[in-house]
Image (spheres, helix red, strand yellow):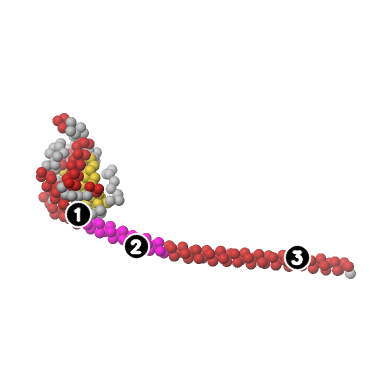
Amino acid sequence: MKVVTIVLVVLTLILAALAGYFFNLSRLARQELTTLNNEKSDLTTRTQSLETRIVELSKQLADSLAKSSKEKDEEIQRLSSAHEQLVNELQSEIQNKEIQITQLADRLSVSLLDKILFPSGEAAITPAGLKVLERIGNIIKNVQDKIIRVEGHTDNVAIHPRLQKQFPTNWELSTTRATNVVRFLQDKIGMDATCLQAVGLSEYHPLASNKTASGRSQNRRIEIALLPMAVAPLPK
């Protein structure tokens, strides 16, 4: 009888211990489930917030791109208008192949052979050259938000000895010519000096071979380039 009683007591204790263990296990499981549910709810809220932000940013980006595209289209149209005016104004010089005008998207270039602006080997602009520059300047000064870069180019023929005191090399000649054109555009045409650049490139950016008289003539030039304000790199 005592043995049975002892067994019953032991079994009761074991059952009580198991009941407590499973009770605690169930409570911990419920707590863990509650925590997981809360974390899931937080993640859902954060996900919804991020999705909303993505939608907002996508709309802002689309609006910005549309605005930028519209502004770029308007800029190209203004430049195309200037291109057309220059072509109409300089028809004679273009036909004589003294001036070449090119437009590539938002960039416009006016290339002038040196002979219509300068005496051979000199940097002072001739009276006839000043009139040509005035016709060009009165058109391009109306193009807004552009860098106006004037580039001086030469052939590879060395400076004549009688001029070497003033221009030791083609570097000095090309730079002085570009500077004189910029000074005219600023002083006489009234262009904003902060948008003007004078660059002397000497003989190192030829358009044609310097082995022929025709090629050297093409290389001796002034290029007036209208470039975007944000990016106006020197030519490579």
The quadrant the C terminus occupies is top left
Closer to the observer: label 1 or label 2?
Answer: 1
Give me the disc on residue 17: 3
Q: Secondary structure at mark 3?
A: helix
The residue closer to the viewer here, 209 or 182, is 182
Q: Is residue 71 left or right of residue 132?
A: right
Q: Earlier in the sequence, mark 1 or mark 2?
A: 2
Cα–Cα gap, marks 1 and 3: 95 Å
Residue in the image at 43% along x and 62% along y: 54
Residue in the image at 22% along x and 47% along y: 193
Q: Is residue 94 visible?
A: no
> How many C-alpha atoms fall within 10 Å of the one at disc 1: few (<14), some, or many (≥20)?
few
The quadrant the N terminus occupies is bottom right
Q: Check the image and name the residue furthest to the top.
A: 161
Cα–Cα gap, marks 3 and 2: 68 Å
The amino acid beneath tag 1 is: Asn
**Measured from the top left, where is residue 28 in percent x and y?**
66, 64
The amino acid beneath tag 3 is: Ala
Residue in the image at 25% along x and 48% along y: 194
Q: Earlier in the sequence, mark 3 or mark 2?
A: 3
Give me the disc on residue 142: 1
The amino acid beneath tag 2 is: Asp
Q: Secondary structure at mark 2?
A: helix
Q: Earlier in the sequence, mark 1 or mark 3?
A: 3
**Measured from the top left, where is residue 121 in percent x and y?**
15, 36
**Measured from the top left, where is residue 38 in percent x and y?**
57, 65
Tag 2 residue:
63
- In this rendering, is residue 126 above or below 40? above
Q: Please provide the residue range marked out in magenta.
A: 55-78
Residue in the image at 17% along x and 55% along y: 84
